[in-house]
Image: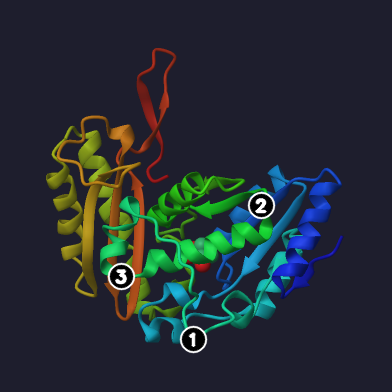
Amino acid sequence: MGVEVLETAAHCRALLDGERAAGRTVGLVPTMGALHAGHVSLLARARAECDVVAVSIFVNPLQFGDPEDIAHYPRTLEHDLVVCAEKGADVVFAPPVAEMYPSWPEAPATAVTVGGVSEAWEGASRPGHFDGVANVVAKLFSIAGPCRAYFGEKDFQQLAVVRRLAADLVLPVEVVGCPTVREADGLALSSRNVRLSPEERRAAAVLFRALSAAQASVTGGLRSGCAVAQVMRDAVALEPLVRLDYAAAVDAESLAEVDEVSDPSSVRLLIAAVVGRVRLIDNAPALAETELSEHGRPVRHLERIG
Ligand code: PAF
């Protein structure tokens, strides 16, 4: 079938229910549009693993605290529909705000809050952000029904919040995390990158360099969480156009800061910074991915950043 573009929850639910009734599995790729190669990688994974692929495109006003941020968020629906068609999506769910939040600009009366993993880092810097994400994702999961849902690891904390939400509410959705897609200089793809000036775009690659330097320090034996975070801070300090928000070594599940990187495979490095007027986030495993020899020893680095 070609791409079906739907604007109402009822149509989307009916179509996906029909597919499941016919024995087909559903993959959901939730997005806010402005699709780039990172989204395309989610779509490709969903395409490979599911019979029917639905992409949602909705710039969710509930998750933006800063009015300037939502006002400048890129909106490229026509281009996004072409990308979805070319990359094999079957359904695009692109509801207007009134469909998702009939009382808008009054916030909906029912709200979901995910505690714990949502509180630090982005949660602290962007109060209310993860409440907005949790609410829209809960609603999208309810509309889509039983499915696999694909999220990028680039938003590592968001992925943790969504996993918690699905587990705690026993939603019939398998949450699948997919690796970050990067530019040649390491900058993680983000819809916000188009708002960087050429100078800022060049400077933004320092986030990747900071993560790589921290990984190298862990590979070299550094084990203090604080010291590893300091390696990232020192790297970012070399770039005057970039203002660091936070850099931390955290437990990959709880996202709590670690004192000791005793088991590097369970530690994630998080970083956030503002470049010009654009807030960027990135993350990586504490230990660069390695290939193991037949004796179980790392023999060479395959990929510096996951
Ligand atoms: O990652 C995003 O694009 C958004 O936060 C999401 C998950 C689509 C919810 O609006």
Q: Which mark is residue 127?
A: 3
Amino acid at the residue labelled 1: Pro
Looking at the rendering, in which quadrant would you find the N terminus? bottom right
Where residue 272 appears, as percent x and y from the top left, is: 29, 63
Q: Which mark is residue 137?
A: none
Where residue 8 appears, as percent x and y from the top left, is: 72, 74
- Tell me the SS state at disc 1: loop
Question: Foreground: 17 or 48?
Answer: 17
Which residue is the site of mark 1?
105
Q: Residues within 10 Å of mark 3 (few under 14, many from 20)?
A: some
Which residue is the site of mark 2?
44
Residue at image coords 46%, 57%: 182
Residue 206: in sight, yes or no? no
Give the CA separation, mark 3 to mark 2: 33 Å
Where residue 296 appears, as percent x and y from the top left, is: 39, 17
**1 or 2: tag closer to the N-terminus:** 2
**3 or 2: tag closer to the N-terminus:** 2
Residue at image coords 58%, 63%: 139
Residue at image coords 42%, 44%: 306
Amino acid at the residue labelled 3: Pro
